[in-house]
Amino acid sequence: MKPCLLALCLALPACAAPTLMPLPAKTTPGTGRLAVTQSFRVALSGPSDEPRVHASALRLVSRLAAQTGMPFNPALEPDATKATLVIAWSSDGLPVQALGEDESYHLTVDSNQARIQAPNALGALRGMETFLQLVEVDAQGFAISGVTIDDAPRFPWRGLMLDCSRHFMPLDVVLRNLDGMSALKLNVFHWHLSDDQGFRVESKHFPRLQQMGSDGLYYTQDQIRHVVAYARERGIRVIPEFDMPGHSLSWLVGYPELATSSGPFEIGRHWGGFAALMNPASEDTYRFLDSFLSEMAGLFPDEYFHIGGDEVNDKEWRTNPAIQSFIQTHALDGSRGLQAYFNKRIQVILAKYGKHMEGWDEILNPDLPRNIVIQSWRGQKSLAQASRLGFQGILSSGYYLDLMQTAARHYQVDPLTGDTADLTDAEKARILGGEAAMWTEYVSPETVDSRIWPRLAAIAERLWSPANVTDVADIYRRLAVMSDRLEAFGLQHNGNYAEMLRRVAGPAPVAPLRVLADATEPGKGYLRDSHHYLQQTPLNRLVDAERPESGEARHFAGLVDKIAAKPDPADIAEARHMLEAWKANDEAVQPVFAASFLASENAALSHELAAVSSTGLEALHAIETHRVRPKSWIESNQNELEKMRKGRAEIIVPIIPAVEQLVTASGERPGAKENERPAKKKRKKS
Ligand code: ACM
């Protein structure tokens, strides 16, 4: 550190601005510096010994110990005047965390003490997360700069849906992701527990559900209770989803009498839809579901209960005479009307057990009571439609983590923009927030953390922070910090990346494979659906190891933006250095391809990265030497790059658009010299 900066640090209390995520509603810098030393102690001040606050405070002490590497006295301080941090709350909150419970808090730090004050215990939990993010290192030790924070969420429903059916997620995966969620102030864990490919809950009323529908991979009722309690302690509601009447093949293996068609049935092993549907025309179906839902309603205390309802392929209903006759007798509007009839029956059962129904877009029907929640996976349009009809809704479209989109793209999706922007204030108030969706067709327990984190943190901020917090560059800066914090916290998105790359490399040195992996990304959207996958297909390839978003490619694109606007020698040198490394890597990585079957399939990818880099170097050279590439060169390279960009490979080269930009810029810059004749010697060398 330069002496003048050091002097500044000593003069001002703490140096760096803390990295907060999600950004609080209001942060006011204060004065003073609160030292965090080994005498750090916490005092609690509330109406009772609220177990959530108590447990969270003890966790805070142990997390702070991990964060600083310093052991602390874990006992709470009985005398608030002596404590470093006082946590005060006015009300313990509800025995079952409810939608809309107050999560606000007020946090002040001065040179004597930090103080969290919250109207409700939940706000105390949120404030503790912010407190931990405030602790920084400065020249004298660990400390917090004086500050006042007034914070409350923008939306009351901020969730993560985790699909545990397509790939079962062991308990430790669920628990560590709940930890991550609480660190980001998320408050709903939507647990997708049944689908065609697996039924994941122990039912005592209908044990063949898990015995025949899960391959032995299911959560016992004790484990479910543990998860619910663990989540409650972190301020997270748990909402189970049992998908019906479609996506229900795994139920039918043990209970074929539920089906529209006759069995036998087997667990679904491939992805995409299956034809099998429950039979909504049979009273036995409702008797079964009544008994099942009564059992599950007791296991999951939240007031909301998700019935799925998505993607009903109605072929079986259309071709079944008994179903068609039922539709006629009840004057239903075809298959849609039949599903609405089914939903209405289920809603009445759920209401009997004290639950509001929740479902995907497809359950929307004006005949249902207005206390249900519609989860929109199709877009803001259906959310707006639901709200206009008087239903509450949450947004998931745009927050599908399985589609491998960038954090920036998710961050820019807002529940109240697009089709919902024109709603009245009353209609907008019915939009409760959103949920990220982690579908797991191509996700295993080993890869799930890297598909969720750190991108979920960007969505968490969208749903917590004020609408005008939209700086994309700043979100990437803070995501990098959060990503490390989450890893320290037990998530494995970084560690598993390194480990999986080592496995792919086998006996060969991993470094060149890592260069390739760092520069490339899994393809976007539903691309992998066009390849052949089954439930048991190993997810141990480079595409599985890779991060959804290449930080290197993003950095390179930023450099190219700057170069295209105003060629600066330092930016050009850095971009050239990156391109040269990628180009040279194709040779360096060959021994890895030779050594490991898992690596060798990536030879074409490596070659493509090198070819794209080579083109980028040629364009950069023209820009650097103030020459203009001939039009024919520009066009043929643009065509080549476009072809590569539109390829359907499972791994993509994300620098292509930036290299296209360089190619374009190498042809059109004002003030450039006359046409450069392609210099053969130079090109060979480059
Ligand atoms: C869904 O993505 N089918 C809810």
Image (cartoon, helix red, strand yellow):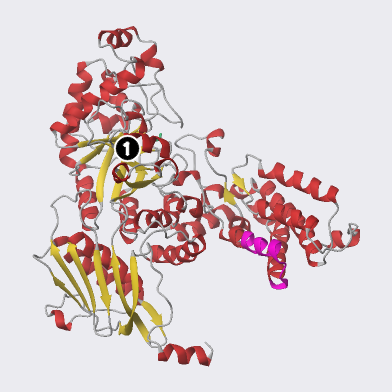
Residue 77 in picture, x, y percent from top left = 15, 78
Is residue 447 part of the magenta span, yes or no?
no
Outermost residue toward the left in this view:
48
Q: Nearer the viewer, residue 51 or 657?
A: 657
Q: Is mark 1 within 8 Å of ligand 1?
A: no
> Dot 1 lies on which element?
helix
Give residue 517's position: percent from left, percent from top: 59, 55
Residue 430 higher or lower than 450, as above or below: above
Say which residue appears at 41% left-offset and 40% top-offset: 380
Question: Where 321 sits versus 66, above or below?
Answer: above
Nearer the observer, 532 or 19: 19
Q: Is residue 592 visible?
A: yes
Q: Quadrant of residue 140?
A: bottom left
Which quadrant of the figure contains the C terminus?
A: bottom right
Residue occupying the point 28% across, 53% down: 187
Name the residue carrying label 1: 387
> What is the span of residues highlighted in magenta in the rendered image?
556-570
Q: Is residue 642 left or right of residue 481?
A: right
Membership of 564 in magenta stretch: yes
Which amino acid, by three-letter code, is at mark 1? Ser
Q: Residue at x 45, y 55 (%)?
A: 455
Q: Quadrant of ligand 1?
A: top left
